[in-house]
Image (spheres, rainbow, N blue to C red):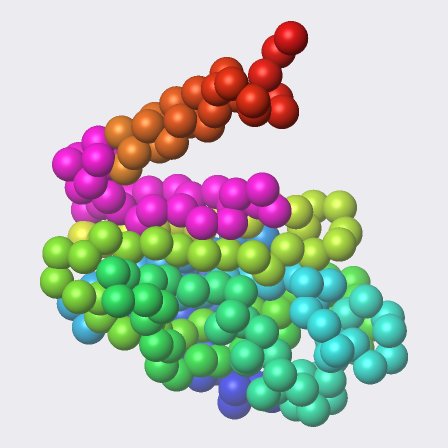
Amino acid sequence: MRGKLAALCAVGLAMGVSPEVAHAHLMVAQRGTLNMVNDGTFFVVSVPVSALSGVDDNLDGKLDSAELKQHYTELSAQILQGFRLSDASGPLPVQGLLLNLSHDHGSAGDATGQLIAMGRFDPAAPDSSLWLDASLFGHKEGEQTLQIKVTRAEQVELLSFSREQQRSAVLLTPWDALHHNLWLGVGHFLVGLTTWLPGHSGRSK
């Protein structure tokens, strides 16, 4: 386990995670980072165990090293399904996915309520808009939101996700942002317009 943690710390440092974060928790609960570079997008994200199904064998609401080892393949699949970066062609493949327990201070043994996932999304198509989908929300208080810090060179962006908002554009150019907001405005207008069309059930009488 120590060897694996050391490897994760090394990857975390390469992704731009501070030494304090890398050695203590690797990532604060309900937080994550995307570091976009030429050879892809590196990510670190903390996932609540209660967001993952079929992996808590002793039903204590936490994950221990034995459960992590036993369900590593299932956990990996759920992480890849619930945390996706996409370009115009669809979800980008993930390379080198690593999972590790985020140790809780004061917890008995190695059981924890948070799982750390780290890896690299393949490079996106040139000049393609990017979208991040995040749906790994737990059932406990404080596990209903997720914040992702995105960096690319000197650009920095903070994305917020919830059960109601599970998709967000990533570092849109000013033109892309204008185009996106215009389409959102058109969509809201059309939805509002249909409520006033003759025969529509939602029309006021």
Looking at this rendering, what residue extends furthest in the left direction?
A: 126
- Which residue is rendered at x = 78% and y = 63% of the image? 106
Magenta includes 36? no
| Residue 9 visible | no
Q: Nearer the viewer, residue 78 or 149?
A: 78
Q: Nearer the viewer, residue 112 or 126?
A: 126
Residue numbers of the magenta segment: 154-179
| Residue 55 visible | yes
Magenta includes 167? yes
Left or right: where 167 falls relative to 60: left
Q: Is residue 74 above or below residue 32?
A: below
- Which residue is rendered at x = 34% and y = 47% of the image? 169
- Which residue is rendered at x = 45% and y = 56% of the image? 133
Looking at this rendering, what residue extends furthest in the front direction?
A: 199
Estimate the x, y position of residue 37 in percent, counting from the top left: 21, 64
Q: Nearer the viewer, residue 82 or 107?
A: 82
Number of numbered discs present?
0
Left or right: where 55 falls relative to 108: left
Q: Quadrant of residue 188?
A: top left
Q: Quadrant of residue 112?
A: bottom right
Q: Quadrant of the C terminus?
A: top right
Q: Nearer the viewer, residue 93 or 41?
A: 93
Q: Quadrant of the N terminus?
A: bottom right
- Which residue is rendered at x = 36% and y = 58% of the image? 34
Estimate the x, y position of residue 20 in percent, counting from the top left: 48, 60
Estimate the x, y position of residue 128 in percent, counting from the top left: 18, 57
Left or right: where 77 falls relative to 174: right
Looking at this rendering, what residue extends furthest in the top direction?
A: 205
Estimate the x, y position of residue 120 in percent, counting from the top left: 34, 73
